Amino acid sequence: MKRDKRPINVGIGDLLQFRWPIIALASISHRIAGVVLFIGLGFLLYGLELSLASPAGFGALQASLSTPLGKAVAWVVLAALAYHFVAGIKHLVMDGSDAESLASGTRAAYITLTVSAILIALATLWII
């Protein structure tokens, strides 16, 4: 019986050695941004509830958002929102057109990453 040299299970090391296409990276990032937004929604709803409860709650929210941890949470949620929004627009445009080639998908992924990077940089400047 001939022994098969292929790995039976794919581990993290195998995934890190694989050269991912830009389209796959953009798709995976879109999904990750959606999960981050789902989790961040809890923080946003808590902040909304705290700010509307009383003037003291609003002051507490302002104080917590001025800390480095508060700024980091706000930045992560805004970055995920920016990327997920741009990638969603890309999906709408790609689904509504006849652009189904590998070249158009690659070009759209690069445009998505570039526009998202610009929006994330602007969010960074706004939060700092």
Image (cartoon, rainbow, N blue to C red):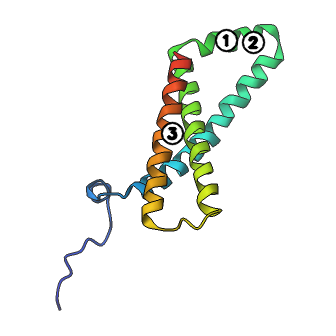
Check contact, mark 1 vs mark 2: CB within 8 A: yes
Q: Is residue 74 left or right of residue 4?
A: right
Residue 44 screen position, x and y as percent: 69, 29
- The relative height of residue 12 versus residue 7 in the rendered view (above or below) is above
Q: Amino acid at mark 1?
A: Gln
Residue identifier under label 2: 58
Q: Residues within 10 Å of mark 2 (few under 14, many from 20)?
A: some
Q: Amino acid at mark 3?
A: Val
Label 3 neighbour load within 10 Å: few <14, some 14-19, many 20+: some
Residue 62, which numbered label?
A: 1
Q: Identify which residue is drawn at 30% across, 72% down.
A: 8
Q: How much space separates mark 1 and mark 3, taking CA atoms? A: 30 Å
Q: Residue at x 47, y 68 (%)?
A: 101
Furthest-front residue in this view: 98
User: Where does the image place residue 109, in percent across and percent down from the top left?
Assistant: 47, 52
**Furthest-right residue in this view:** 53
- Mark 3 = which residue? 115
Residue 9 lies in quadrant: bottom left
Q: Which quarter of the figure has residue 4?
A: bottom left
Whole-percent x, y for residue 71 in the image: 54, 19
